[in-house]
Image (cartoon, grey):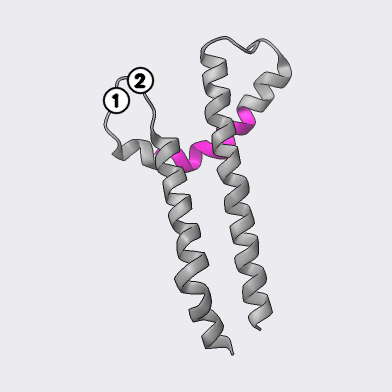
Amino acid sequence: MAGIFQAIFIIIHMALNIYWYVIIASAIFSWLYAFNVINSNNQFVNQLGMFFYNATEPALRPIRRFLPNLGGIDISPIILLLIIAFIQLILNNPIEPFIYSLVV
């Protein structure tokens, strides 16, 4: 039973790590797109942009509702990265040994 919980924690941790990199890639992509570094008429670029938008916007939208307008600067990805880091910290340190003690 403890092996199942350990596998679940590993999967959650890996998913959060992948999402971490997707958020960073999305932010970099948005900067490149905004400054016309990448060709916005390219179909691959548009599909990549739609992927990043669809992957990150559901998590960023609620954060943007609570943040004040900072004059065109969007810090919601930074807040989301901090939330992910906090979740990983909680999952790795205090909760994991507690759940193992319940199972064993």
Residue positioned 60% across, 67% down in the render: 9
The C terminus lies in quadrant? bottom right
> In the current view of this chain or complex, which residue is farthest to the front?
93
Q: Quadrant of residue 62?
A: top left
Q: Which mark is residue 72?
A: 2
Q: In which quarter of the image is residue 12?
A: bottom right
Residue underneath mark 1: 70
| SS category of the residue bearing label 2 | loop
| SS category of the residue bearing label 1 | loop
The N terminus lies in quadrant? bottom right
Residue positioned 64% across, 81% down in the render: 2
Q: Principal SS element in the magenta part?
A: helix
Asked whether 52 falls inside the magenta stretch, the response is yes
Disc 1, disc 2: CB below 8 Å? yes
- Residue 16 at x, y percent in the picture: 57, 52
> What's the magenta region?
50-61
Instruction: From the viewer's side, name the closer residue of 27 and 50.
Output: 27
Amino acid under disc 2: Gly
- Residue 3 at x, y percent in the picture: 68, 78
